[in-house]
Image (cartoon, helix red, strand yellow):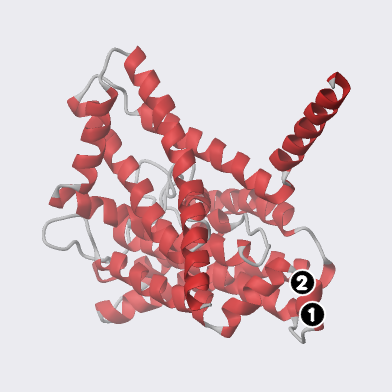
Amino acid sequence: MESMNRKQKWASFGRSLLSSLVPVIAAFIIGGIIISLLGENPFTTYWILISKSLFTVKGFAYTLHKAAPLILTGLAIAVTFKANIFNMGVEGQLLIGGFFAGIAGASLTGTSPVVTKVICMAVGMGCGVLFALIPAVLKAYFRVNEMVVTLMLNYAMIKILEFLATGVFRDNGSGYVTTPTIQAGAMFRRLGGSKLTPFFFISLIVFLIMYFVMNRSVLGYEIRAIGLNPVFAEAASMKVRNKIIEIMVISGALSGLAGAGQMMSDQFKYTLTFSGTPGLGWDGMLVSLLGKHDPVGILIAAIFYSALKTGSDKINFYTNVPKEIIAVIQSLIILFLAVQFFDEKTNLFDSLKKKITGRDETTVKEEL
């Protein structure tokens, strides 16, 4: 019996791994065709991409540095998606967390660096939680679609922070829209001359905590139960409303911490391009989908996705291939993952297959 369960687990792991690899391989194949049409060798291009971002000390440290917020935003997405709750507001929660962590970091004086950093991270997490509570309460008590609410709140938050950055909290000594630079005590220092900071190790600690929560705790079981059947979960004495709020609070805290970490380890002030394009929250969704909403998968996917980003500049430097090819590959991965996700929720391909198979069988019978 145990050996059968073990085989089933390995089979499930194999299917999950394959479904994650297929979109990536397909995207790289199409990207390779485009590179060939540009007159360059795709194998050489991809080797430069991987080797410069993963197989050199400096490149690997930079990859890990960029992966830190992606680990957190990926986990923030996963903890809600597992419960069949679609928190599309991770980007907004990250932005407000980063913004006010930056304001706190620029304002705090006379405190030790450790206390300053803890306060800034706490502010970031608190802001992320408060922003996540809006769709959480609407979902739990009024059955308002959280996907629509969180998507709309993202753009509202972007505009609110833009207004604050250009007015109340603007650094008037700067020639562009920005908040004041945070104090030195609020900054995470780089380690060993690389761009890696202690924030990466904080993200690893959070990863370990979330791994335990999602796979080894009662809450993790409840999250999966709500995702599979909320009516059954309610019948089994789970207070689904409270759990929805609790799950969204965890997601908001992770998002806010990601924003605070991005502020304290990379940006050091809030600008209109603080989160990048398309944004760390949206990148986190890709990472979560690629990692199948599993903490270990998310960790691997975050490092892989970060390697793509950090290696793109090296492609432009060592070959004639424009670095925008990585954006094309990333877009293709998103497209294939979106199709896969849609199929998982609707069983569209299975339905089409059955229809095609049924038609073929009918045709064969008529011919006989």
Residue 142 in view of the camera: yes
Observer-nearest of 181 and 303: 303
Residue 99, above or below 312: below
Looking at the figure, which quarter contains the C terminus?
top right
What's the residue type where badge 2 is placed? Pro
Q: Residue at x 37, y 64 (%)?
A: 261
Q: Is residue 20 left or right of residue 305?
A: right
Residue 335 spot, x, y in % from top left: 56, 36
Residue 44 spot, x, y in % from top left: 22, 27
What's the residue type where badge 1 is placed? Glu
Q: Is residue 194 left or right of residue 141?
A: left
Residue 59, above or below 96: above
Q: Is residue 243 left or right of residue 169?
A: right
| Mark 1 closeness class: few <14, some 14–19, many ≥20 residues within 10 Å | some
Q: Residue furthest left?
A: 192
Q: Residue at x 52, y 74 (%)?
A: 214
Residue 297's label in the rendered image is: none
Q: Residue at x 14, y 52 (%)?
A: 57
Q: Are marks 1 and 2 in contact (CB under 8 Å)?
A: yes
Residue 32, above or below 113: above
Residue that label 1 marks: 234
Residue that label 2 marks: 230
Q: Is residue 352 left or right of residue 261?
A: right
